[in-house]
């Protein structure tokens, strides 16, 4: 069938041909008086599949010419086209969108008339960057509208990797128990040591804090700061003098970059009943358990980030692949002035 290129659309003016495109594949949008209007992504795909001959001023327009023309008209056309093509090749009905999303994808075997979109898709290059605050806003919007968001990331070879994004509300079952006395620890360089085993056992019973090594226990700076802020532990400096929370926080901030952000996420997770330990060996800030670490594996890997921070999709790819390999859920803990929200990325195959 023939389509006429007019600016940023391709008009299929024949009524029967347009009807066939729309009813059999949900391509285009019905024209007044018959036929359909195809957007450039749809028309380019149909041209590639040899289902559409495109003309401009009665002259044929080859696929490569149409592709190059579309690239000058639509921003990121090549990225969006590769994602559209991938979904169509998988048997989905796909329509282009304006606004926050690039594509809406309908369930296999369904049409526009008997279903609603199953996914809303944002097509991006692997080299693109993003602000986490923008993703949070999109996730909130999707949750309110009961939408499922997919990010389709196109690499330099044209392969498409899909990530499903959603807000999470992690909770655990370990909440503080009462302690008869306040345990005492000593600050040594970048960690705190507890030498009295009675104190060490109290901290373990209190909420599985620290790690026992031989005849003593060591705690991380973030654990110690959290406990001191709650009045549940006393930390002494090298001279044996008690350290206030501000003193310990100041020392910790000099030792660890982004300490305040980590502390905020650590404390929030602890208040949610999760047991939080170092996530260094997994390439993240924390690993979190929903109950006793003796009885279960860590469920979450959590990376603390500040509102407005720029991230890359290569970072997401590395982290999600790792979390999938160790069967854990990866959460980005975004700290803003208002609150802390957790964003989950999952590798996904449509």
Image (cartoon, rainbow, N blue to C red):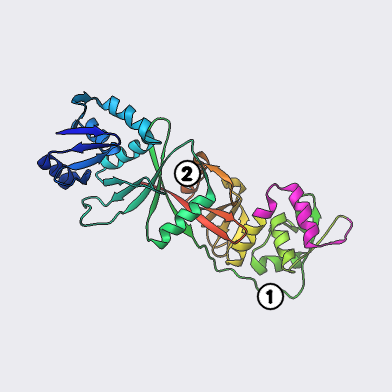
Q: Position of residue 8 (x, y in %)?
A: 30, 36
- Residue placed farthest to the right in the image? 239
Q: Position of residue 102 (x, y in %)?
A: 37, 45
Specify whether residue 247 is painted magenta: yes
The residue where tag 2 is placed is 321
Q: Which mark is residue 129?
A: none
Marks 2 and 1, the one that precedes in the sequence: 1
Give me the residue at 21% from left, 57% from top. 114
For the residue pair 209 and 170, the one nearer the viewer reads as 170
Counting every numbered tag in the picture gives 2
| Bounds of the magenta segment | 239-261
Q: Position of residue 227 (x, y in %)?
A: 71, 64
Q: From the viewer's perspective, is 220 left or right of 311? A: right
Q: CA distance from mark 2 to mark 1?
A: 40 Å
In the rendered view, tell whether residue 242 sits above or below residue 284: below
The image quarter containing residue 262 is: bottom right
For the residue pair 330 and 133, the one nearer the viewer reads as 133
């Amino acid at each position: 069938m023939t389509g006429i290129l007019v600016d940023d659309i391709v008009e299929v003016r024949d009524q029967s041909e347009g009807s066939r495109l729309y009813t059999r594949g949900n391509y285009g949008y019905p024209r007044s008086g018959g036929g359909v209007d195809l957007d450039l992504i749809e028309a380019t795909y149909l041209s590639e599949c040899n289902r559409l001959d495109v003309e401009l001023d009665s002259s044929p327009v080859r696929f490569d010419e149409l592709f190059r023309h579309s690239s000058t008209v639509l921003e990121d056309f090549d990225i969006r086209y590769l994602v559209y093509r991938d979904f169509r090749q998988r048997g989905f009905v796909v329509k282009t969108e304006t606004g926050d999303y690039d594509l809406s994808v309908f369930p296999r075997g369904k049409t526009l008339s008997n279903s609603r979109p199953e996914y809303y898709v944002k097509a991006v290059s692997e080299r693109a960057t993003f602000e986490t605050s923008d993703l949070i806003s999109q996730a909130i919007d999707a949750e309110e509208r009961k939408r499922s968001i997919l990010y389709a990331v196109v690499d330099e070879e044209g392969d498409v990797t899909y990530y499903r994004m959603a807000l999470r509300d992690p909770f655990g079952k370990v909440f503080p128990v009462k302690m008869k006395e306040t345990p005492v620890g000593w600050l040594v360089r970048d960690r705190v040591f507890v030498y009295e085993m009675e104190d060490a056992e109290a901290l373990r019973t209190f909420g599985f804090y620290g790690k026992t090594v031989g005849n003593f226990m060591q705690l991380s700076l973030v654990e110690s700061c959290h406990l001191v802020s709650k009045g549940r532990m006393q930390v002494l400096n090298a001279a044996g003098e008690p350290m206030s929370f501000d003193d310990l926080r100041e020392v910790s901030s000099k030792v660890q970059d982004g300490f305040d952000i980590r502390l905020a996420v650590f404390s929030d997770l602890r208040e949610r009943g999760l047991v939080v330990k170092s996530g260094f060996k997994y390439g993240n800030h924390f690993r979190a358990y929903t109950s006793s670490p003796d009885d279960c594996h860590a469920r979450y890997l959590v990376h603390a980030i500040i509102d407005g921070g720029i991230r890359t999709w290569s970072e997401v790819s590395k982290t999600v692949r790792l979390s999938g390999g160790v069967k854990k859920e990866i959460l980005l803990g975004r700290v803003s002035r208002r609150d802390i929200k957790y964003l989950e990325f999952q590798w996904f195959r449509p």
